[in-house]
Image (tube, rainbow, N blue to C red):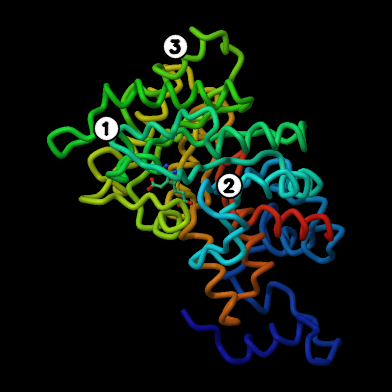
Amino acid sequence: MSIPDTERQAAVGANGSDGADASIVVGNAALGTRTPQVAGGFPTLRLRRLRRSEGLRRMVRETSLNAADFIYPLFISEVVQEPTPIGSMPGQYQWPVSAIARQAEEIARLGIGAVLLFGIPAEKDEIGSSAWNEQGGVQQAIRAIKDAAPELVVVTDVCMCEYTSSGHCGLIRHGEVQNDETLELLAREALSHVASGADIVAPSDMMDGRVAALRVALDGQGFSDTPIMAYSAKFASAFYGPFREAAESTPQFGDRRAYQMDPANGREALREVELDIGEGADIVMVKPALPYLDVLARVRDRWGLPLAAYNVSGEYAMLKAAAANGWLDERRATLETLTGIKRAGADLIITYHAPDAARWLAEE
Ligand code: PBG
């Protein structure tokens, strides 16, 4: 359907743009039946009215970001002597325990709600025994952070992949990750984190039954008040690439598709969430965030418990790379990305952008 020329000219004039003759009054008559003047429709209804100024836009804004909702991942290394940059994650570092207190103070000062700790051990073995070493990097870092910034919530990632010589998230037998035997290892790891002062444990291994196993283990040792944040719907994603460089946790053979979820499965993600809630998860998570915003929205619709989204390493790397090339406005693109994750339903966002985003939000 094309608009006849005479009407098109009249309509342009009516907008009052480019100094058109104000005496040309164009009502709906000029637009004919295409834009009927009905109550509740154009021209009485104009959604642009509430977009005219920043004050109006701010008033009707549906979603707002808050540094307190951010969880900032930190890589604690037993190997490095000083903060060591991670090539594929510009601005992120592997931290020695000695540098972590100052870093924690800075994160707390920015108003960021929590940190999520990953460990890079000096020694790896078949069962990942460094994972529950009382003097391990993560265990020492927990104590240092709780000393330096007691109000900062310390979450620990509970998984075997950084600690096993295979680089897999559990114990290997006959070339396969053993589910039930791995549960015992995860429980030992989680207990050692909590004994060191961790506020929340976050199992990311995707073994069946791990939330229940951790709950039973924690309750049995007097830690019935420690919440579990479950990586419930964790997909086997290409977007973990940079993380594996950062955490030195690339599988030595095969991949993780026999335990992490198939990216094609949304309904199965809801089953994973449902099971974790049934096993006692206090917070559930969808990971990665951007290719799975639909999953996030469906979980949000169905359950009321706190929901986290993990804006993973590859998502961070893409944005940083584009920004470094001058292809994107980093600040706007980052805040838009985080807003989108929140709008889709996340209460909490695990993100490497947390310090930058917190600084930008403080300026706004
Ligand atoms: C596993 C774990 C991974 C991430 C968080 N926990 C990697 C994996 O499953 O291979 C990825 C996080 C990211 O990419 O930022 N312990």
Element under disc 3: helix
Residue 88 lies left or right of residue 30; in this view the side is left
Which residue is under mark 1?
Answer: 171
Of residue 212 and residue 2, the one placed in the foreground of this image is 212
Residue type, label 3: Val
Which residue is under mark 2?
Answer: 73
Q: Earlier in the sequence, mark 2 or mark 3?
A: 2
Residue at horizontal 59%, vertical 47%?
74
- Check whether the beta carbons of the residues at disc 1 and disc 2 lie within 8 A of each other: no
Element under disc 2: strand
Task: Choose mark 1 or mark 3, whichever is in front.
Answer: 1
Total labels: the figure holds 3
* Mark 2 Cβ and ligand 1 under 8 Å apart: yes
Q: Tell me if residue 79 comes above or below residue 272 in the rendering.
A: below
Q: Tell me if residue 181 comes above or below residue 112 in the rendering.
A: above
Residue 106 lies left or right of residue 219; in this view the side is right
Residue at horizontal 46%, vertical 33%?
158
Residue 91 lies left or right of residue 362; in this view the side is left
Which residue is under mark 3?
Answer: 216
Q: CA distance from mark 1 to mark 2?
A: 25 Å
Residue at horizontal 63%, vertical 62%?
334
* Mark 1 Cβ and ligand 1 under 8 Å apart: no
Of residue 122 and residue 207, the one placed in the foreground of this image is 122
Q: Tell me if residue 204 comes above or below residue 332 in the rendering.
A: above
